[in-house]
Amino acid sequence: MVGLPRYYSPMTQVVLVGLVCFLCPGMFNALNGMGGGGQMDRTTGNNANTALYSTFIVFGIAGGSIVNLFGVRWTIAISGLSYALYSGSYIYLNHTGNGAFTIAAGAILGIGAGIMWAAQGMIMVSYPREEEKGRYIAVFWIIFNLGGMLGGILPFAINYHSDTDSLSDGVYIAFVVLECLGSVLGLALAPPSKVVRDDGTSVVLVKYTNAGKEAIEIFKLFLNPMMLALLPMCFTSNFFYSYQFGPVNASIFNLRTRGFNNIFYWGAQMVGAYVLSFLLDNTNMTRRKRGLIAFIIVAVFFNVIWGGTLKMQLKYTHGPLPSGETTDYPGGLIDFLQHSRAAGPIILYMLYGVGDALYQNFAYWIIGSLTNDNQKLSRYSGFYKGIQSLGATVAWQLDAKNVSYLDQMIGNWVLLGISLIPMFYVVVTLKDHSEEAVFADDKAKVIDDQQEPSAGTSTSY
């Protein structure tokens, strides 16, 4: 009989942060995956995403240092509330047609999301041993994307018999409730100073940190050769969302099918993450060999799905318009019950989810392979999410400014190709073991169980 893992074990903490992201970013992903936040007119949703990722750039990069200074519990819990505020803003939009509140809520969410994802990334890639990082990333990714699946089921079920092109208040209220629960769950996370692996090693190096030191470390990220080499990877890693959710999902499928698609999009992510973890943790191969095989898989897979997307994109130029004109996709909007028309586009959309999981899990694995130092990894994760958000800001504005669907699609494909070159360089330079030890030499200043770190203190961050 297999017992439950210890509360202070790395796996328990990764599962907990996975559940928080299941309820907060997972619900956001489901809402975003509907295209335009579930509204027929995507303008407000696109502008809200631009505001979101604009602040995310700053707080993603600074998020690692914020977490280093103030700890994971309250930073994650408070950040979770920003997701609920954003979802709730669409209720106001439904009743007033005024998008200002939603755009402002997007900017606030960018602050919270930047901090939350820096904390999440640190927990996910610094808590496990080196040979377990692929599995831990996959466990998190599976739990997290269960949220996207649930978030796809809600609009699919609630709007199953609806003829409207926008989500009802009931869907948004359900998202708000779940996101508030996620915020509260963040308080259940243990201080990293108390998390111990099964082999008895600590997950942290006890170090002194303060605001000045963290500011210097943020600046040094932009001088780090590996971080600079990974800039294109970071920039590209969420760029495709705006195209997949808008010009594809929101443009050729009706409302209930968009929710149906999201169930399989996020479900496919779980499959992709699970399968890739077996390769990334295969200790029968060197770390470099595992990385090279994963690189080939990611490169080939993405080029294949973008080739299929080009073939589909050449069939249409726009989705439903605010004027009432429907999509020019042959035969009009697709319903999932139209099996002969729906099968190909739905399968392609599902493969987008697989590709996203492969790319982002591989990206996290690369970052986790650079060091075992949890302070550095919190900054690296924040850097990844910040530059990722810079790419997303550009992408959402391309759709908001009505850049042609074909140009958006080609732009995505070109960016992928550019990102692969420096990514390959980083992979071939990986060592079998990271240099930093993860034993805490100074045990005298470990933080108390109930205490979170504060600026200018000796801290596990």
Image (spheres, rainbow, N blue to C red):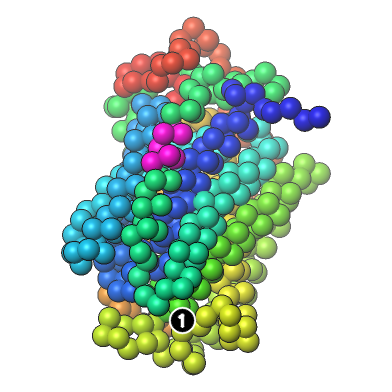
- Tell me the quarter of the picture where residue 210 sits: top left
Residue 369: quadrant of the picture = top right
Residue 420, percent from left and from top: 55, 63
Helix, strand or loop under label 1: helix
Q: Which segment is the magenta one?
A: 180-186
Residue at 50% from the left image edge and 24% from the top image edge: 190
Name the magenta segment's main secondary structure.
helix
One can see residue 364 in this view: yes
Residue 4 % position (x, y)? 69, 28
Establish if 352 lies above or below 445: below
Q: Nearer the viewer, residue 276 or 413?
A: 276
Depicted 185 relative to depicted 233: above or below: above
Q: Residue at x 37, y 48 (%)?
A: 176
Where in the figure is residue 240, as x and y percent of width and height?
46, 67
Residue visible at 67% across and 43% down in the picture: 135
**Which one is nearer the viewer's eye here, 130 or 213?**
130
Of residue 99 and residue 394, the one placed in the foreground of this image is: 99
Residue 193: x and y in percent read 51, 19
Identify the amino acid type marked 1.
Ile
Residue at image location 40% in from the left, 77% down from the top: 163
The residue that label 1 is drawn on is 252
